Image (cartoon, rainbow, N blue to C red):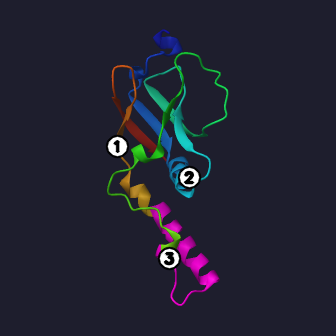
Amino acid sequence: MNGARGSSDPTAVRSLAVTTDDLVTALEANRRGDDPVVLRVTPPFYGRMRARIHRTGGEASDYADPEPIHLQPRVFVADDAPAFPEPDETRPDPYEVEAHHERHTEAIRAWRSAVRDHLREAVALPTDDGPHEVEVKYLG
């Protein structure tokens, strides 16, 4: 493909725009065990691209070659990011169902806010020639 119409080569990408809410939602969905979620970069490839939240599996691809790039949400998050809160970590003593629910809901709310402070400035796209690092621009 030519530059005006985009490229079939993912190394044409210099930066990805990612909606922060989409990223946090994808991280949470994968942690909760819902259907697998990725951030998807759809060809043709340009210098600036969007990575959008996408549920994987059971889909027929409208793309031949190249296929869209699926990035696991965790690649956008630094290693020092807070862990998603587990229900056992928010269990009150003495135990009360409603108090547990409230504490866990608040812990998730705090995590959603805190994880935003631990986002990577760059990620690597997989290519036939190895990883291709691109800058990430967060929206929202």
The residue sitting at the bottom extreme is 94
What is the x, y in percent for residue 10?
A: 43, 22
The residue sitting at the top extreme is 2
Q: Nearer the viewer, mark 1 or mark 3?
A: 3
As drawn, the label of residue 90 is 3
Q: Earlier in the sequence, mark 1 or mark 3?
A: 3
Q: Nearer the viewer, mark 2 or mark 1?
A: 2
Gap in angstroms between the C-alphas marked 2 and 1: 19 Å
- In this view, the residue in front, 101 or 123, is 101
Residue 81 found in image quarter: bottom left
What is the x, y in percent for residue 99?
A: 59, 83
Which range of residues does the magenta coloring cover?
89-113
Name the main secondary structure of what is drawn in magenta. helix
Q: Which residue is mark 1?
A: 121
Q: Nearer the viewer, mark 3 or mark 2?
A: 3
- In this view, the residue in front, 84 or 19, is 84
- In this view, the residue in front, 90 or 136, is 90
Q: Earlier in the sequence, mark 2 or mark 1?
A: 2
Gap in angstroms between the C-alphas marked 1 and 3: 31 Å
Q: How many marks?
A: 3
Q: Which residue is mark 2?
A: 25
Residue drawn at point x = 34 percent, y = 20 percent: 129
Q: Label 1 is placed on what type of residue?
A: Glu
As drawn, the label of residue 67 is none
